[in-house]
Amino acid sequence: MSYLEWAESQLAEIELLTSMFPTLDELELTDQLALAELRDYVESSASADSPPPSRPQFLIKQKLDCANTEGMEVIVSCAYPSEYPSVLPEITVRCSSLSRAQQTELHAHLNTYLMENCQGEVCVLSAVDWVKDNLQVFVNKSSLAAPPPKKESASPQPREVFSRLWIYSHHIYNKSKRKNILEWSKELCLSGFSMPGKPGIVCVEGPQSACEEFWSRVKALTWKKIMIRHREDIPLDRQGEGSGIVESLDCLRKFTGFEEAMFDPHGNRGNHMDLGQLYQFLNEKGCCDVFQIYFGIEGR
């Protein structure tokens, strides 16, 4: 399919959604300019060699009135990639009755359902229907009270662990994903960096629990390919003779804060980075050995 055919499918689906959810309380187009540009792109029979200049984004708001969910508001946020519906849309579900972990689990199940049943087809309505049909399961999980932990007088304290995750993605282009990566790393007090483009690289370091939470959120997004290429886990309570903790979390960090790093973007879409500059950056941080892990060659 061409960009024009994808755009035609996107516009047709938005018009269908607008007819089904006619009020602002049901459907909110968060970027009217993007919709106008999409319509102009389709109606002017623009070149199929390049995508529309911007991407439509919208919110579908639903109130559920089933057991344990009476009057509960659920918001389904959707953004179209340029190649949708050949690729899945970026869908996020927000519901105040779900914990963050349960929302992550819901997203993973939703993405699996869409990949298995809607690949190559417009699917926002299918996603909304799936959420309405399955949200009850996740709400029930959140309402179950956890049994009180048993008290054990001599139970040892869990060991604190410092982690550094080296994440690899086929590509990181999407502005929303890039924003999430920056905001989540700040929220979880993680340091490191992200390199957008093709391939995409993310490094986060800090408490193991925070790194795992970051990874659970990131992998729940829609990706062509994403994985942890390498990880480092260092216990913080290693003790010498008569000494206390010999290594603190902060002294193990190789990065100060978290940043998005660009290395002389080039290529037709400006989406390839200078790997030589990336190697120098890693070398300055004392972790150049990971370059060979990522790319299978020694850097220079």
Image (spheres, rainbow, N blue to C red):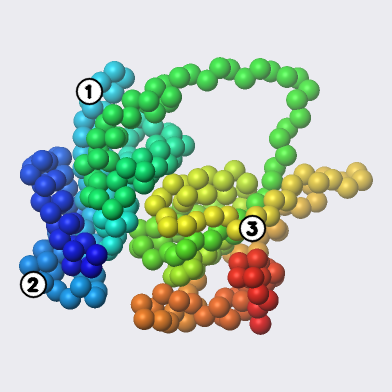
Residue 209 picture location, percent across and down: 59, 43
- For disc 1, the marked residue is 65
The amino acid on which the numbered mark 2 sits, given as a three-letter code, is Ser
What's the residue at 84%, 45% (across, down)? 239
As rendered, which of 207 and 169 lies closer to the eye? 169
Residue 230 has which mark? 3
What's the residue at 8%, 72% (across, down)? 44
Q: Is 223 left or right of 250, judged from the image as shown?
A: left
Q: Is residue 34 visible?
A: no
What's the residue at 20%, 54% (across, down)? 30
Instruction: Give the answer, above or below, for where 16 lies relative to 55.
Output: above
Crowding at dot 1, Cα within 10 Å, few <14 / some 14-19 / many 20+, comes out as few
Crowding at dot 3, Cα within 10 Å, few <14 / some 14-19 / many 20+, comes out as some
Of callouts 1 and 3, the N-terminal one? 1
Instruction: Give the answer, above or below, for where 67 lies relative to 210.
Output: above
Disc 3 is placed on an element classified as strand
Disc 1 is placed on an element classified as loop
The amino acid on which the numbered mark 3 sits, given as a three-letter code, is His
- For disc 2, the marked residue is 44
Q: CA distance from mark 1 to mark 3?
A: 45 Å
